Amino acid sequence: MLVQTANAAARTRHSALSAPSHQSVARRGNTRAVVAVAHRMLVIPSHMLTTGESYREKGGNAFLEWDRKYAERRTTRQLERLGYQVTLTPAQIAYLPSSIRVCG
């Protein structure tokens, strides 16, 4: 029943559970991606019980934002190990019309 629920959650649009699923389907296949979503569905209540926080849906862009920050940290550390001094400054973001969606 958990895998069936995870499969449905992976298909929903703009959900915090669906964004990582779409990315891992390409790498691992549908079955493993659904099992990964099922695992996340078990970790969320465990985290809620441990910290005492309530669940907040972060949306599909939350994973992309986390992935971007992780890539920044990883790349910065690699360059620093090679002996470079790194300072990150955000580039000017181009205008995107509201009809274009970034994720989903």
Image (cartoon, rainbow, N blue to C red):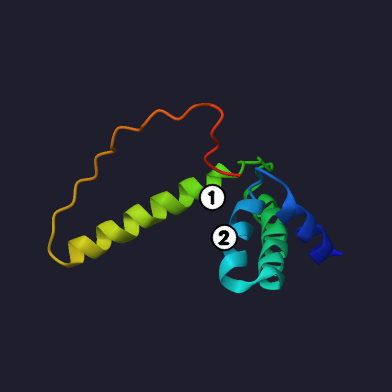
Q: Which mark is residue 40?
A: none
Query: Residue 22's quadrant in the figure?
Result: bottom right
Name the residue tied to disc 2.
Answer: 23
Q: Nearer the viewer, residue 21 or 97?
A: 97
The quarter of the rendered structure image containing the N terminus is bottom right
- Badge 2: residue crowd in 10 Å (few <14, some 14–19, many ≥20): few
Q: Residue at x 24, y 45 (%)?
A: 88
Q: Nearer the viewer, mark 1 or mark 2?
A: 2
- Badge 1: residue crowd in 10 Å (few <14, some 14–19, many ≥20): some
Q: Position of residue 72 (x, y in %)?
A: 33, 53
The quarter of the rendered structure image containing the C terminus is top right
Question: Is residue 39 left or right of 98 when viewed as pictured?
Answer: right
Name the residue tied to disc 1.
Answer: 63
Tell me the CA gap for discs 1 and 2: 10 Å
Q: Earlier in the sequence, mark 1 or mark 2?
A: 2
Q: Are marks 1 and 2 in contact (CB under 8 Å)?
A: yes
Q: Nearer the viewer, residue 35 or 104?
A: 104
Q: Residue at x 73, y 53 (%)?
A: 11
* Residue 102, placed above or below residue 3: above
Number of numbered discs: 2
Q: Position of residue 50 (x, y in %)?
A: 65, 54
Question: Is residue 12 left or right of 86 when viewed as pictured?
Answer: right
Q: Position of residue 92 (x, y in %)?
A: 30, 32
User: Dot 1 lies on which element?
Assistant: helix
Q: Residue at x 35, y 33 (%)?
A: 93
